[in-house]
Structure formats: structure tokens, C-alpha cells
Amino acid sequence: MPMRAVPMLAAALLALAACDQAQTQQPAKAPPPPPEVAVVTLAPQKIEIDTELPGRIAAFRVAEVRPQVSGIVQKRLFEEGSQVEAGQQLYQIDPASYEAAHQSAQAGLARAGAQLTAARLLANRYKPLAEAKAVSRQDYDNAVAAAQQAAADVASARAQIETARIQLEYTKVLSPITGRVGRSAITEGALVTANQAAALATVQQLDPVYVDVTQSTAEMLRLRRRIERGELEVDETGKAGARLVLEDGSIYGETGKLLFSEVTVSPGTGSVTLRAEFPNPKGLLLPGMFVHARIEAGAVPDALLVPQQGVTRDQRGQAVALVVGEGSRIEQRVLTVDRAIGDQWLVTGGVAAGDRIVVEGVQKVRPGAEVRVVEAASPGAPRRQQGALPAAR
């Protein structure tokens, strides 16, 4: 090596040593801070549980109007679709033949009355003669029996008059109930017969109305078991309230009540029928209308509601949530979800009161990671919400 290169090499070595010393003296970078997550602290609360069931409207009373006598219809005395009162005349059947029968029965009564008078007079005459033995006892007994038979004929004639009068009244076809009458099946001039199969018209009482809904036996048994375990509180009267959701999604303004449940399970559907009663003062509910009834199943006294945004599904389809445990570290819990309550899940297992559920920043953390915790805004769920169908566990 040339002698002039030695000073240059020494200077380079000194510069490298100075750089290594400077790097050694420089402090190491601080680790990044824990990620921030927003949590909701679970607190038990009392909520009302509703079960939504499909059903149809049924009239409170239905009367099919049929003639009780035969004849030609002379008049129709109502407007189709109008409100009619009980006892209001709907049709007039030709009464001529029935008026004649009534008059004939009256004449029969007069004839029987005359025969009774003659028989009684004869019996009265024979009585002293029989005592004086002017006539035989047999003749007197025959006279008394004839008088009694004449009295029976008078009673029969009066019954025939009453029958004829009833038949004459039946020519006026009356409405048996108060309600709304439908279309007329016949017109003037039509021949009708007594107790015919086809109805002349149908009258339906539409205030109140019935709502017949169906519930699966599995759901019914599940609710009963929860009541027996004390997880659900029910009304002491046993009359559950009900609300209606109409076909357009609107809520019916009147509140109804559950009347009874069938005691027989349908073998085809495995469900039972429940009947509720609703007031219908404006006539909005019509027979045959499809609705959804929200039946009050009971109250959960210490329910735990978890926001839906804090619940996900794992690879096996289980509902899971991230919980901030000891040392501000993340734990993953498998939840037992009962149903949706608004924008929250009603949880019956996997978490307890006081647990902190991560609702924001879920994507930034993994189980075991340390986090920085802030409280999220309270969900503020109302006290009564509609429950959806039970979620998969």
C-alpha cells in the first residue's frame, strides 16, 4: 500500500467508529399505544317480550239470513253494504196465502168454540136428569166427555191460529243481529223456499272483531318453560294484551286482548290457534284481512341487552362478542341469543351484568390484546320492543 493512502484509511476508520458510537447512544423508539375501543357496560333491566304471529280477521258475529217460509219475494228493504239493526226487515215475501191460512185458523177457532158451548150446555142439562135417574148415567158421562173434547178442540184451534200468525210473520224476513249486511243473493220476484241451503244475505257484526292467529307448539312450550323457571313474569289476570300490524306495515291504533288458546294441535302444521279480540269502531278491520298480532308473552325482570353491532358470528355460526376483561385485555365470549329487541340482542348466556362489550373498534383488536377503553353512548332501548323469531344458538 502506498504511504500516502494510510492517512486516508485512518480517517475513514475514525469516521465509522464515530457513527457506531452515535447510533449506540440514540434511544430506542417507544412501542405504539394500545388501540382504543368503545364499550357498553351491561346492566340488567326489565323488558316486555312480545311474540308476533300471523293471523286473519274474523267477524264477531255472522248471521246468514234464510227464509223460514216459501213464497215469492216482493221487496228488498235494505241497501247492500249498509248497517242494519237487529229485527230490521230485510225482505218481504208474498203474504197472501199465509193471511188466508191465518183467517182459516180463526174460523176454526170460532167453530170449535160453538161446539164447546153446545157440549157444555148438554152436559149441564144431563146432570140433574142423571141425578133424578131420568137419563142413564152413560148418557151423562158421554155428554161430559164431549164437552171436554170440545174444550180440547178449542185449545188446538188457538194453537193453529198462533202457528198461522207465526207463518205470516215469517213473510217478513228480519235481521237476527245488528251489523253490516253484504250483497243480496236474490232479487224481487225470486222464489224462495223454507230453510233453503242458499242464504239470501249475510249480516256480520264488525265491532269488535276476532283475530285468529297460529303459534307453533315448540314456541308455546318454550315460553311456558321460561315462565315456570321464573324467567318470564306474566299478568296475574291471565289476559295478555295484543297489538296489530296491518298489511301495509302500520300499527293499528286500538289495543286488543287475548281470549283463549285452542286445546287441540293441528296435525298438519303442528300449531295451535289463539284468538284475540280487538275493538273496531271505524270499521277498518274487515273479515279475512291478513294481519300480524303482537301478543304479550310476559316480562323479563333482569334482561341483558347487547347491541347488535357488538355481536358477530364465528366460523361455526355461533354468536360471539369481544369483552374487556382483567388488565384491559380482550376476551372472546360465545353468547346464547334469544331474540332481537330493537337494535339489540336479548342474551341469556355467555355474559353477565357488569361485563364490558366492545361495540366500536372490533376490527382493530384480537383476543388477548390490551386495549384502551372508552364508554360508548348508551343504546337507550325502550322498555317494550317487538321480539323477532328466536335466533340460532
Image: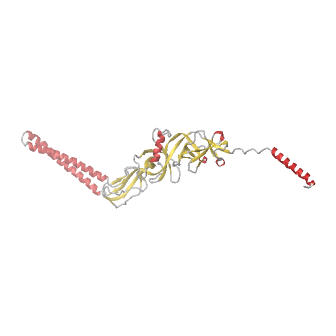
Residue at image position (83%, 45%) is: 21
Residue farthest to the front, as pictured: 1
Q: Residue 316 vs residue 377: left or right?
A: left
Between 81 and 275, the one lying in front of the other is 275
Residue farthest to the bottom, as pictured: 189
Tell me if residue 89 can be seen.
no
Between 106 and 341, the one lying in front of the other is 341
Q: Residue 315 vs residue 105: left or right?
A: right
- The image position of residue 15, as x and y in percent, is 87, 49
- The image position of residue 325, as x and y in percent, is 63, 40
Q: Residue 274 vs residue 126: left or right?
A: right
- The image position of residue 98, as x and y in percent, is 28, 55
Residue farthest to the left, as pictured: 134
Name the image quarter holding the N terminus.
Answer: bottom right
Tell me if residue 101 can be seen.
yes
Q: Is residue 225 above or below residue 168?
A: above
Q: How many marks?
A: 0
Q: Is residue 380 above or below residue 77?
A: above
- The image position of residue 2, as x and y in percent, is 92, 55
How are the residues colored? secondary structure
Between 92 and 385, the one lying in front of the other is 385
Residue at image position (8%, 42%) is: 137
